Image (cartoon, coloured by chain):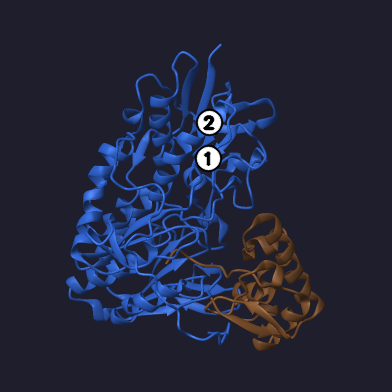
Amino acid sequence: MKNKLVVLGGGTAGTMVVNKLYKKLDKRDWSITVIDKDNNHLYQPGLLLLPFGVYTPEELVKDKDRFFPKGVEYRRTGVDQIVPEKNQIFLDDGQVVIYDQLVIATGTTPRPDQTPGMDDPAVWRKSIFDFYTFEGSVALKEALDNFAGGKLVVHISEMPIKCPVAPLEFAFLADAYFNEKKMREKVQITYVTPLEGAFTKPVCSRQLSYMLTDRHIALEPDFVIEHIDPETKVMVSMDEREIPFDLLVTVPVNMGADFIGRSGLGDDLNYVPVSKETFLSKKYDNIFALGDASDIPASKAGSVAHFAVDLFAENFMQHIHGRHMTHNFDGHANCFIESGNGKGLLIDFNYQVEPLSGMFPIPLVGPFPLLKESRLNHLGKLAFRWIYWNLLLKARWIPIPSLMSMKGKKQVEIKKGVEVDANH
Amino acid sequence: MPIIEIAGKPINVNEEGFLTVYDEWNEEIAKELAKQIEIPMTDEHWKIIKFLREDFKVQGETATSRRVQTVGGVPVKEQFALFPKKPAKKMAYIAGLPKPKGCV
C-alpha cells in the first residue's frame, strides 16, 4: 500500500505544495491527491488592479488543474468534514478519503455576513463593494467608472485580512484614478482602519505617513465596526462613531473555511493553529496548514506562502522519515505596494524585523529600492504576474531567498524617548 | 531598546513604552501603567488584563479584541467602555504585552 498525501485546496499555496512534493516524494511509496471544488485559479494580486482597468477579468483566471503535475489525482469536490482521529475526510460528493499526511491550504474568505447590514441586498455590491473576490472586483470596476463623486470610504473590518496593504493601495490608486479623470475634487476619500493608524510600525509610520496627507486622504483610526445602516448608508463603530458613505470599498471580516471549524481544527476565525516555524498542527502530527489557512502571525499573502512552502517541503521530507524538522520559517514577507501614478514601494520583513529601507533582492544593488516610491517597483509588480503563472506555481527556481536577509538594510536608530501616551 | 524605571524597578520597554520582557511585569507595574493613560482599574479591568496575561503565555501572541470576547468573555463593546477609544492598544499596554499591529 502506498502512503497517501492529501492536499485540500489548489490555490496558490496548495499548488506550490503539490509541485514541490511531487518532485521530492518517491512515487513508488507515495500518491498525491488534491481536493478543490472550484477549478478557477485566480491571480489574486490582480484583483486590486482590475477595478482601475489595469487588467481584464480574463487575464486573471486559469484552470487550476493545468498547474498540477500529471501524476497527481485531482478531485473536484468540496470538503464536508475531517475526522482527524481516524485520518478521514468526508467529501461533499458523499465519498470518504483516508490520508496518511494532510495539508490544509483552503485559504481565507471575505465574510460580509459577519457584520450586520453589510450584505444587505439593498447595498451589497450596489454601494458596498469588496475587491478580494473575482465578482466583487469586477462589480467594483463598474461602480468606479460610474461614480459621479461624493464620499468614498476605504475600510478594513477586522484583522487579520488577506494582503494587509491592499486597502491602502486601493486608496492611493483611487486618488490617482480620480485625478486622472479630472474629478478628484468631487471625491472625498477616507481610510478607515481598526488599527491605530494606516502605518503601525515605527519606521513605516515615520517614512510613509506623508503618503496619506499628500494625497488628501482622511484617516479614521481605531474604528471597530459594529454595523452598517443600509438605509442611511452609515457605518457605526463600537464606540458609536458614524461614518457616512456614498461608495464603500470594504474588506469584510476574513475567515478560514467553515469545514475547519466543523472538524474542530480551527480557532475562532477557522484558522488552523500550527507551529509558526514548521506549520505542523498543534494537535495532530500528520496535519499541516499552509498559506492563508493557518494562524501564523505573518501576513496572509502569496509571498509568505511561497517562502513558507519552500521550507515546508524540506521539513516534510524530514517529518515523514521520522526526523526532527530543522528548516524553521522566520515569517519572511515581501510585497510590492502600488502607490498610484505608475509608482510603487517594496517592503521586506519577517516575524521580528519591521520593513526597513535598503535595496532588494541583492543588497546595495537592487534593482528594487525598499520602502521608497519608485517606478521600477510598479513595473516589478506588473512583471510578477508572468513570474507567478510560469515559475512560482510550478515551483521553479526564483532568485529570492526564503529566509529574510539583513544585508545592506539600514537599521534605524530610534532616538525618541520613552514618553508614552497610548492616547496618541 | 530603552530601560526605564516603573514602580521603582528598571523595566525594558520599546520605543513606544510597551514592555518587552514578559516576566518583568507585575500588578504594581500594571497599576502604574494604567495611571499613566488614565484608566481607573476596577475588577472588570483586571479580569481582562489577567486573561491577556494567561492567554499570551499559551499562545505567544496578544489576544485580539475578538478573542477577548469569544474566549475571555468580555464583549468588544464593553472593552470600549472600559478602555475608551483604543481598547486593544490600551489593554496590551497595561498587560505588558505587544500592541496589535499591521504589516506596515
Residue B49 lies in what quarter of the image? bottom right
CA gap, disc 2 to disc 1?
8 Å
Q: Earlier in the sequence, mark 2 or mark 1?
A: 2
Query: Can the viewer see residue A219 in this picture?
Result: yes
* Mark 1 lies on residue: A326
A47 w.r.t. A68: above or below: below
Residue farthest along the top direction in this orientation: A1
Residue at image position (38%, 30%) is A19
Chain letter for brown? B
| Neighbours of disc 2 within 10 Å: few (<14), some (14-19), many (20+) | some
Chain letter for blue? A
* Mark 2 lies on residue: A318
A79 left or right of A41?
Answer: right
The kind of residue tagged 2 is Gln
A50 left or right of A106?
Answer: left
Residue at image position (70%, 55%) is B58
| Circles 2, 1 touching at the beta carbon (< 8 Å) | yes
Q: Chain of mark 2?
A: A
Residue A148 lies in what quarter of the image? bottom left
Q: Where's residue A376, x and y in %?
A: 19, 61
The kind of residue tagged 1 is Thr
